[in-house]
Amino acid sequence: MSTLLSVTTPVSPLLVPNLDFSRPVLDSIANALHILFLFTYTDFKTIVFPVTAFACVAAPIQHPKGLLDALAWIWLHLLQCNVSNQYKSVSEDVVNRPWRPLPSGRISANAARWLRWSLIPICLAVSARHGKEVVLASATLTVTTLLYDEAGLAGHFIGKSLCAVPGYVTFEVGATRILAAHALDDVARMSLLCSALVISTTIHVQDFPDVAGDQALGRVTIPIWAPSGSRLFTLFAIPAWTVLLCRVWGVGIVHSAILGAMGAGLGHRIYARRHREEDKVSYLLYNLWLLTIHILPAHARWGICQW
């Protein structure tokens, strides 16, 4: 009897289907998130970090949840802009950034087009949680993105500037408004004005590493239109802005000297080192400089740079 009870009758695997779908589902989710990350990867240093730092100082930050909301808003709108831009410039990315989702084949053109148009109502809906001003910022970003990609303004540096500068400042307005408990004060408004002026006169630094890809698309960027003149202008513009903004925000003489040297060194590097790989490093350093001058208004709020 005990022997009979210990015998286990084998069960056919056909009668017990494998219902563990967790691994394929998790793999699909991870792959989708990786693709979204790749769409925005290069602009963490150009948009996410500088704009977040700017908003934390200009608002200033009131609560950790506000910071998370601002970060989510910045990244989601960056995704909208980048999917649209990369969908329209695959041939450029084949030359400059072949690892991006479209040229690498990680996502189809049809899927990217669907994602691109789906993100517009999603961004507006997310913005609606934060009030009319943030919705207006979202709508402005959508308009500048469409003008840039659909109206062909990306093809010439004048049109590119008319889209890039308002677009960048709109990122700052939206993030700052999410973090601010009340209406923007004088420090916030002056910060936005200074940022707009700096971006409008130095944003062409981003085009130095991409000359080959832009030429392949027939674009006329400032480095293509004025190869030497644009570098000569940058040689003086970056240190001049550094000194001027230190004066505007009342930064102490020691900090001003350090930042001035930083700006002068960056300007000289951009002027003197002209190979594509050097331009990539210069652009990274430019974003660090931009991040630094974006937080100078902190001195007006908290007096952190008195010496």
Image: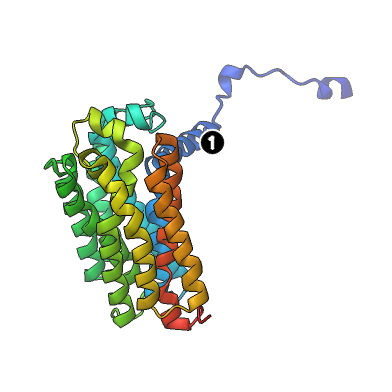
Q: Amino acid at mark 1?
A: Ser
Q: Residue furthest left?
A: 151
Q: Is residue 76 above or below residue 94?
A: below
Specify whether residue 102 is in view: no
The location of residue 252, given as percent across then percent down, is: 48, 79
- Residue at the location (43% across, 46% down)? 282
Q: Which residue is mark 1?
A: 22
Q: Identify the residue at image location x=22%, y=55%.
A: 141
Quadrant of res 71 = bottom left
- Residue 48 versus residue 199: which sits nearer the camera? 199
For the point 62% across and 16% down, the residue is: 12
Residue 34 higher or lower than 105, as above or below = below
Secondary structure beneath dot 1 equals: helix
Query: x and y percent of residue 186 in the render?
Result: 29, 82
Pointer 1: residues within 10 angstroms few (<14), some, or many (20+)?
few
In terms of image quadrants, where is residue 298?
A: bottom left
Task: Residue 273 in the image: state x and y as whole percent.
Answer: 42, 41
Going 47% across and 66% down the picture, which residue do you hit? Answer: 259
* Foreground pick, 20 / 25: 25
Q: Is residue 39 visible?
A: yes
Going by the image, does 256 lie left or right of 51?
A: right
Percent x, y for residue 145?
20, 48
Q: Is residue 62 above or below residue 172?
A: below
Q: Is residue 53 left or right of residue 132?
A: right
